[in-house]
Amino acid sequence: MMEKRRKVTILDLYAMKERGEKISWLTAYDYPTAQFAEAASMDMILVGDSLGMCVYGYEGTVPVTMDQCIVHSEAVRRAAPTAFVIGDMPFMSYQASDEGAVLNAGRFLKEAGVDAIKLEGGVRVISRIRAILDAGIVVCGHIGLTPQSSGQLGGHKAQGRTVESARLLIEDALAIEEAGAQLLLLEAVPPEVARFITGKLSIPVLSIGAGPDCDGQLLIVSDMIGQFQAFTPKFVKKYANVAEVITNAMKEYIKDVKAGAFPADEHCYHMLKGEDEKFKDLIKEYE
């Protein structure tokens, strides 16, 4: 009998950084996918605002609402009781004020039972980070390519590729740690910049497209399993192609339906023994 895994906590993530054990992190947006992640002993799960594209078909993350994030986070939490689950603060859930940021961050814990929240931005959101931390909520920062503000970045482009932009990333990272955030995500950042930041900070630094030297790695599950078809970022490694498997299965189903091959007898419920003769009498009443 497989031994039940102990709940992953923020202290476990710090211990993993300390001993050099890489942290595994994946997004999930629904109960079945989170069940798979739990069964695989995933360390962390992010209920990312990427659900806007991967689940709802939006062109980006900006339209995603708090209510959508809460519903998906609640489902993931039920499916993955031992993973460290992080809820992603959607656009305009924290930008307006410290008070609004705290209230929305609190919803993730109170309504969905997540372990932490993530929000985008560096120096410009420090007051938000501090306010959320003061409310007793674990915070994960997110710098580099920040999709919610990608318009200001000129699109979904890698960051920190010049010395000056690398300096800004380093300053953001230092400010986030100084503010008290317990985790940091670097997105689409050169490995040499990510390596320096990871070594400089005492908190776990995670990578999504930031090279191999961070304390752990994050991927979007829909990219990793080949489900999302619109585009594939450079940093993604596809471990499966479920889109092909599912599409082929649907084609076979259509073929069987058109040919009358499905459902076969083994897919049908039959009347109880002795009831078939009575049914014949019933039919006669309608003749």
Image (cartoon, rainbow, N blue to C red):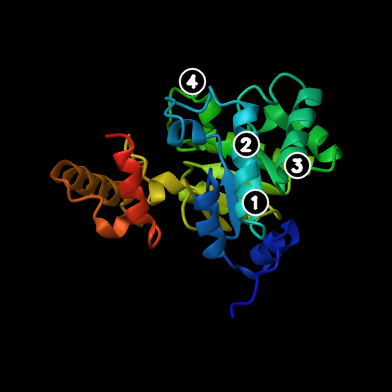
Vertical order, 200 against 187 (above or below): below
Q: Residues within 10 Å of mark 3 (few under 14, many from 20)?
A: many
Amino acid type of the residue tagged 3 in the rendering: Leu
Q: Which residue is mark 3?
A: 109
Number of numbered discs: 4
Task: Farthest residue to the left: give it.
Answer: 259
- State yes or no: discs 3 and 1 in contact (Cβ < 8 Å): no
Which mark is first along the chain, 2 or 4?
Answer: 2
Q: What is the x, y in percent for residue 65? A: 60, 25
Determine the CA span between mark 3 and mark 2: 12 Å
Determine the CA span between mark 3 and mark 1: 13 Å
Residue 252 appears in the rendering: yes
Which mark is first along the chain, 4 or 1?
Answer: 1
Q: Nearer the viewer, residue 174 or 75?
A: 75
Determine the CA span between mark 4 and mark 3: 30 Å
Name the front one of labels 4 and 3. Answer: 3
Which dot marks residue 71? 2
Q: Which residue is painted at 55% across and 44% down in the image?
A: 186
